[in-house]
Image (spheres, grey):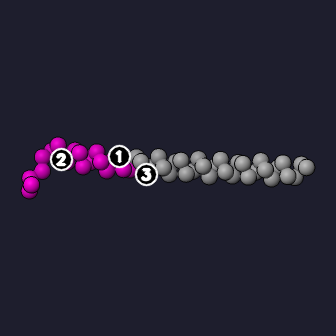
């Protein structure tokens, strides 16, 4: 168990890269949702003002 092969190292690096990508993707989705929510709120406000 004490020795690590280059394959193990590559797998570990691959895992952390996937984690980072996952976090970036989730962060991006959150930003998109916030943007969409703000847009909806602005639309509703505009509609209320025009009535």
User: What secondary structure is the magenta-colored segment mainly?
Assistant: helix
Instruction: Tell which circle, 1 or 2, labels the residue nearer the N-terminal end.
Output: 2
Residue placed furthest toward the left: 2
Q: Residue at x 35, y 46 (%)?
A: 18
Q: Which residue is mark 2?
A: 8
Residue 22 drawn in magenta: no
Which numbered dot is residue 38?
none
- As measured in the structure, the alpha-carbon distance from the residue carrying label 2 to the one carrying label 3 is 23 Å
Residue at the right extreme, as displayed: 51
User: Which label sits on residue 23?
Assistant: 3
Going from N to C along the chain, the mark reached first, 2 or 3, is: 2
Mark 1 Cα shell of 10 Å, populated few (<14), some (14-19), many (≥20): few
User: Percent from the top left, x then y, of residue 24?
Assistant: 45, 49
Q: Are marks 1 and 2 in contact (CB under 8 Å)?
A: no
- Element under disc 2: helix
Q: Viewed as shown, does residue 46 lie left or right of 22?
A: right
At horizontal 84% and vertical 48% (from top left) the residue drawn is 47
Q: Are marks 2 and 3 in contact (CB under 8 Å)?
A: no
Q: Are marks 3 and 1 in contact (CB under 8 Å)?
A: no
Q: Which residue corresponds to mark 1? A: 18
Q: CA distance from mark 1 to mark 2?
A: 15 Å
Q: Position of residue 39 (x, y in %)?
A: 70, 48
Q: Residues within 10 Å of mark 2 (few under 14, many from 20)?
A: few
Q: Position of residue 45 (x, y in %)?
A: 80, 53
Provide the residue span drawn in magenta: 1-20
In reply to whether residue 12 is colored magenta, the answer given is yes
User: Which one is earlier in the sequence, the residue at label 3 or at label 1?
Assistant: 1
- Left or right of 27 in this view: 1: left
Task: Say which residue appears at 12% left-offset and 50% top-offset.
Answer: 4
């Amino acid at each position: 168990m004490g020795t690590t092969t280059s394959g193990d190292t590559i797998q570990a690096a691959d895992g952390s890269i996937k984690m980072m990508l996952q976090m970036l993707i989730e962060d991006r989705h959150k930003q998109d949702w916030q943007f969409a929510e703000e847009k909806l709120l602005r639309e509703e406000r505009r509609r209320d003002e025009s009535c």
